[in-house]
Image (cartoon, rainbow, N blue to C red):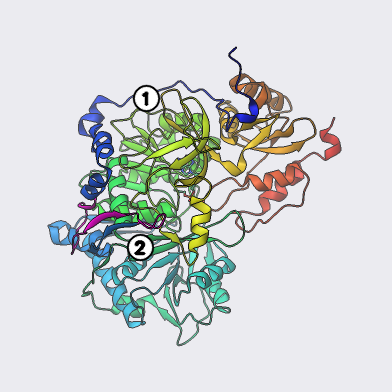
Amino acid sequence: MATQPDASEETLANLLHEHRRFPPDAGFTAQANATSSDYEASASDRLAFWAQQARRLDWSHEWTQVLDWSNAPFAKWFVGGRLNAATNCLDRHVAAGRGDRVAYYFEGEGGDTRTITYAQLTDMVCQAANTLTDLGVKAGDRVAIYMPMIPETVVAMLACARIGAPHTVVFGGFSADALRTRIHDCDARIVVTSDGAYRRGKVVGLKSAVDEALLDCPDVRSVLVVRRTGQDIDWTPGRDIWWHDSVDQASTEHHAEDFDAEHPLYVMYTSGTTGKPKGILHTTGGYLTQCSYTHWAVFDLKAESDIFWTAADIGWVTGHSYIVYGPLANGATSVLYEGTPDTPHQGRWWEIVDKYKVSILYCAPTAIRTFMKWGAQIPAKYSLGSLRLIGTVGEPINPAAYIWYRENIGHNRTPVVDTWWQTETGSILVSPLPGVTAGKPGAAMKALPGIVADVVDDAGSPVPDGAGGYLVLREPWPSMLRTIWGDDDRYVDTYWSRFPGLYFAGDGAKKDEDGDIWLLGRVDDVMNVAGHRLSTTEIESALVSHAKVAEAAVIGASDETTGQAIVAFVILRSEAGDGGPEVVQELRDHVAKEIGKIARPRQIMVVPELPKTRSGKIMRRLLKDVAQDRPIGDVTTLADSSVMDLIKAGMPSDAERRH
Ligand code: PRX
């Protein structure tokens, strides 16, 4: 007798069924960079496919072997090849006669602007490379960069790459403490910073945080300081150097050495589930190859005509790969925006899109849900007619948010690419290819050409179509992390031990009936309700599909009857007002109707804000503490720690909850 699968055997339930499809538009397909034969070509000879992509770059010495995986999971790509990442991003475009092409349109938060061409950027990077060399920085030395979103941040990164000194960019919103931990971990001896930064119209200090961090970093010998705000700062003679007194005065002549393909390019820290952040190491040849390829294929980049905008911070991997290395390797023109989406008004992004005629926009679902909350009337005031492709990254995008983005920003004309990747993967691995793959709201769809992804069950066996499990990668890829800085064992343990021979990303996923991939959130967040393993994502998406809801976060709180019970925190859209008491019942019924009774939340809290990390990810762990009346855990990575007080103040007590 056919029965439901035994709940205890189920790896992750597949609840949400989304039937909307957006096949590629014939006009777009006709001009698209990617073609369906890319999948076949890469499947028949994956390494030949990557060798072909590596030829997008200039190599001073050709590699002798595409991949050395004999010491797995420690990969070597393009063995023996030599190149310089910075000259690949800059000099070669200038040498090809494209020096006058704009590399960046910089838009300051306060409205100040700068237009920087490839020739100018090359000169600036040569100057900074000369200054770093004068400061004694040699190939292999680490340089910490703690900066706002200004052109000098890009210049500092590329100057490091040019001289072979791996950079570690620490997000400018992090504290002195976070900066110090990272400087210690990678033993950086030089810090590049600015006096301060503009944030929401106010001036905040960066140099002051560096001073505080360095109280405990005796090995740091020089601090290079860009003047951005002009605020007063403390000065340590002999250690601190103004950028305008050094870099701006340096020679624009600089001979760039070549480096081994596996030479370290940068270390990017990402928080681990416990304790010490992990320094993710990326190297040169494979990383740049895959950033360049994915930027070209996934965004359909036409370097001569597109204006590309990744609206993320350079302090995250998204900024490294798709503001700096991918776009510059491809000779693209990008927008670099310093500020927040609501400074000085909630239409700022759309104003920028119209001003620069942005044709490709890449941002995070958290931003899209914020725009949903503010209302469609805001982008409606702008033309947005220049956009031809829009993308998202960083979290699962709820189908309702995808549709909102497609309608209100893409005007139902542009493809939407939902791109899955991680700090560790270095570049996009799972995404539709525009012009080739149909869009499904909420699905990241398919592994890109050259990538072998799968969804497996607890035992590591592939799940059938229509079932949920864990997202894994079966084969190494060029831009993969090489290790965790200084901790090879932690690298093996964290990524390669759960399923032997497979890279496990930590994400839940499902294959739909067509075999397409949907991301279901971090497996640490999975809930177990009456024996069913439910993903937070699907229930959140059901909530967000209600017209009154802009954002939702779901957690499992312990429950006497069901093991765990679903508790949801929702932010209503502006036009829904405060919703009234009946809204909670309406939303509970809505979830039950959309995905089944099993997913009906025990409790729904209407909240003004959700706790998020500075890169916009919801911190469900903290909501769990609130829901279970526990003391609230570590809030140091929260963007705004007062959010927790607001949420806590609105929670009913345990006694009230039982009635
Ligand atoms: O959980 C996945 C989620 O973000 C994680 C990686 O975060 P981070 O290293 O900060 O890099 C963010 C930018 C690449 C993943 O493990 N994630 C990222 N993109 C998506 C996503 N979840 C669902 N859909 C996506 N498109």
The reply to whether the magenta stretch includes residue 66 is yes
Tell me which corner region of the image, top left, top right, bottom left or bottom right, holds residue 16: top right
- Relative to residue 90, is residue 345 drawn left or right? right
Q: From the viewer's perspective, is 103 left or right of 505?
A: left
The answer to whether any part of residue 203 appears in the image is yes
**Callout 1: SS:** loop
Q: Kindly identify which residue carries mark 1.
A: 22
Report x, y in % for residue 224: 42, 76
Q: Position of residue 165 (x, y in %)?
A: 36, 71
Task: Please state which of residues 39 and 136 is positioned toward the viewer in this rendering.
Answer: 39
Q: Position of residue 78 (x, y in %)?
A: 26, 57
Q: Is residue 96 left or right of residue 579?
A: left
Q: Residue furthest bottom?
A: 238
Q: Quadrant of the C terminus?
A: top right
Residue 299 shows in this picture: no
Amino acid type, residue under disc 2 in the picture: Val
**On-image quarter of the N terminus:** top right
Mark on residue 154? 2
Residue 338 located within the stretch drawn in magenta: no
Label 1 to label 2: alpha-carbon separation = 36 Å
| In the image: residue 117, left or right of residue 266 | left
> Of helix, strand and loop, which one carries label 2?
helix
Image quadrant assignment for residue 373: top right
Magenta stretch secondary structure, dominant: loop
Q: Counting other residues with Cα less than 10 Å from the Cα at mark 1, is it few (<14), some (14-19), or many (20 or more)? A: few
Q: Amino acid at mark 1?
A: Phe
Q: Which residues are magenta?
A: 54-75
**Of residues 270 and 638, the one drawn nearer to the viewer in this rendering:** 270
Give me the residue at 26% from left, 72% from top. Answer: 126
